[in-house]
Each structure stands twice: as C-alpha cells, then as structure tokens.
Amino acid sequence: MMSLPLSEEIQKYTVPWLQLDWPIDWPQIFDRPGDLVLEIGFGNGHFLSDMATARPDACFVGIERAWGSMRRLFRRLNALKLNHVRAIEGDAAFLLQHVFAPQSLSEIWINFSDPWPKERHHNRRLIQDTFVKILAERLKPGGEVTIATDHADYATWITDILTRQSDLQSIYATPSVHQLPGRTPTKYEQKAIDAGVPIHYFAWRRKSELSVETHIQKVGNMPNIVLEGAYQREDILTLIEQATDQVWRENHRDMQVVIKMTDIYCQLPDNHGLISVMVREGELAQYFGISLLFRKNNQLLVKLAPMGQPRPTWGVKKAVQKVADLILETHPHLWLASSTVGL
C-alpha cells in the first residue's frame, strides 16, 4: 500500500491533545467504545501495532517523544490498515496525568524506557513514585501495567518503587519475572534474549476502586489585549527587542511557570511584530508566537499568533499579559482598552 502524505497521516493517526478538553473523551476519538490500552514509548511501533492487530475490539494509544518513531508508526498502521490506534507526541508523565481520566485505562505497557544509568540522571527515569501513583489512578480496578527492562539497576529501582506503594500488586509471587507467557518480544528485546541478557518483567494489577477526583480542563478562549493611546511603533519594537531573553518565573497552583521571550521579528507585512515565546508549566513546554498588531486608530492589539498552535493555558495567557504590561509600564500614554486574558 502506498504511504499517505504526511499531512493526512497526522490527521488520521495523531490526537490534537492541546486543542481538546482534558481528560480526552477517548470513545469520541475512536468513535466507539472499547478497552483503552496505552503503550508509553512505542519506538518503532511493532509492539503496539502487533497488539492492535490481535485485538481489533480494543482502542490503542501510543505516547512517544521522537518524531521519527511517530512517522514509522504511521507507515506501519497504514500498511496494516489499522484504524483503532492513535499516537500522541509529548511527555508521558504529563500526558498520563492530564489526558486520561482516572480509572479509564485497561492496560499500560512500558517497554524498555531509558534507564538513565548515571546516578545524577536518576531523576530523569520514567518510573518514579509520583508517576506510579498517577499510573495506578488511571487504571481501572483490575487493570494491569506491564514494565520491561533489561537493566539490572533500573529493575532494582522499579522494584523498590512498586513494593512501597499500596495501589498495585504483583500478579506473580515476586515483584518481577524473567519470562512472560504469551508475550511477543520487541526487536530490541529479542536481541537481548539472544545475547543472554536477563529481562525483568513487572506485571502488576490495580487492586480496587480508588477515590480520585476528575479535573476537567476546558480549552479556553484565545487571549488578546487591546491597548489604546499614543505610541510609536519603533519604540515598542525596540522595547520588546531589548526584553528578548528575559525570563519570568511564576508559581501557579504549586507549579513553576517559566516564560521567556526568545526573539522578535519586525519586518513583517503591514509592519506588525511577531514575538517568539517559550512557556514551560511543569512538564508542559509550549513554543508559540505573540503578535503585535499596530492599528491606524491608535490601537495596539497583543494576541496569540497562529504559530505553534498553543493551548491557552494559564502560562500562555500570562505571557500575553506580560507583553502588554511591559508596554504599558514604559508608555504612559497607552491604557488598557479591553482584555480576554481572564487571569
């Protein structure tokens, strides 16, 4: 089968999670009910697509950071004509917490995540106490998580974390086993097996009902601010240019928010300005643009640009407000005419 154009692959197989309400309504995404199965870090996509081929009645979601892995999965899904698999590009811990409702997942599979062997990098390991707590909350009662690693020290780390929590219990008499009946190994896994490297499989089950509150996060309105009064376009662009690389740090709901203006583009049609911005809220980083639209009626519009298609989170709204505040602080003849920021 011929591969689809990239634009069609993205539309067919990915989930525009930044533009959707959280948690995502997965039956609506798949246009049918079914057990929801998640693989975190699907690599070349063979394990995920093999599961989907064997279980046409379930709904499969894969999370991956690498765009190359996403493309390989798209081609495989297209070749196998699998329409019940979706992919999300992003940070697994953040996505697990926000886009999946509590008690919504039947299975979670984590195959050979990076062991980060150096001690100073252990905080980068996927399996952490907080991650396992969220993972357990997202599983249905009786739902299962399977973790595989060939790294002995990481296996010890995972064992310690799993054995000190109380929401999951091992399916076996031991925390991990070296063989998992019925499992089809990944390409990486088969190489390790052939080389005689022990594989540690952790198969754990959610014990019972947990009382977890669901936080609905609706996609809000796009923020924009209108300033009115006398100003010189060149003065404002110079001000913003001088402020690039400035970093603001805020705390919002026990989460650190970092806002940074990285560049400004002035030579645009109609003499407008475009500011390149990065906002990091916890594990969510968004890169987008803020437009400065200089109007003829002594108005200046500060608004999100289409660049980056950001989700209008608190941090994104704060970035728009920061730009407007910066201008107002240095231009006493300007005033706030209207705002949809709503902080």
Image (cartoon, rainbow, N blue to C red):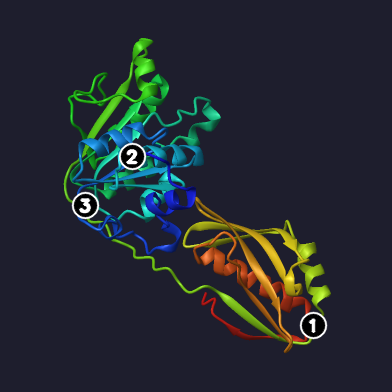
Query: Callout 2 environment at 10 Å: few (<14), some (14 to 19), or many (20+)?
Result: many
Along the polypeptide, which appears first: circle 2 or circle 3? 2
Q: CA distance from mark 1 to mark 3?
A: 57 Å
**Quadrant where the N terminus is found in the figure:** top left
Q: Identify the residue under disc 2.
A: 39
Res. 70 visible in picture: yes
> Is residue 182 rendered to the left or right of residue 150?
left
Q: Identify the residue under disc 1.
A: 231
Q: Where residue 269 sits: x, y (%)?
A: 73, 71
Q: Do labels 2 and 3 touch, CB within 8 Å?
A: no
Q: Identify the residue under disc 3.
A: 210
Along the polypeptide, which appears first: circle 2 or circle 1? 2
Q: CA distance from mark 2 to mark 1?
A: 54 Å
Query: Callout 1 environment at 10 Å: few (<14), some (14 to 19), or many (20+)?
Result: some
Kind of residue sitting beneath label 1: Tyr
Q: CA distance from mark 2 to mark 3?
A: 22 Å
Res. 161 visible in picture: no
Q: Choose top left, top right, bottom left or bottom right for residue 194.
A: top left
Q: Choose top left, top right, bottom left or bottom right for residue 245.
A: bottom right
Q: Secondary structure at mark 2?
A: strand
Q: Residue at x 35, y 32 (%)?
A: 46
Along the polypeptide, which appears first: circle 1 or circle 3? 3
Q: Where residue 201 sits: x, y (%)?
A: 29, 25
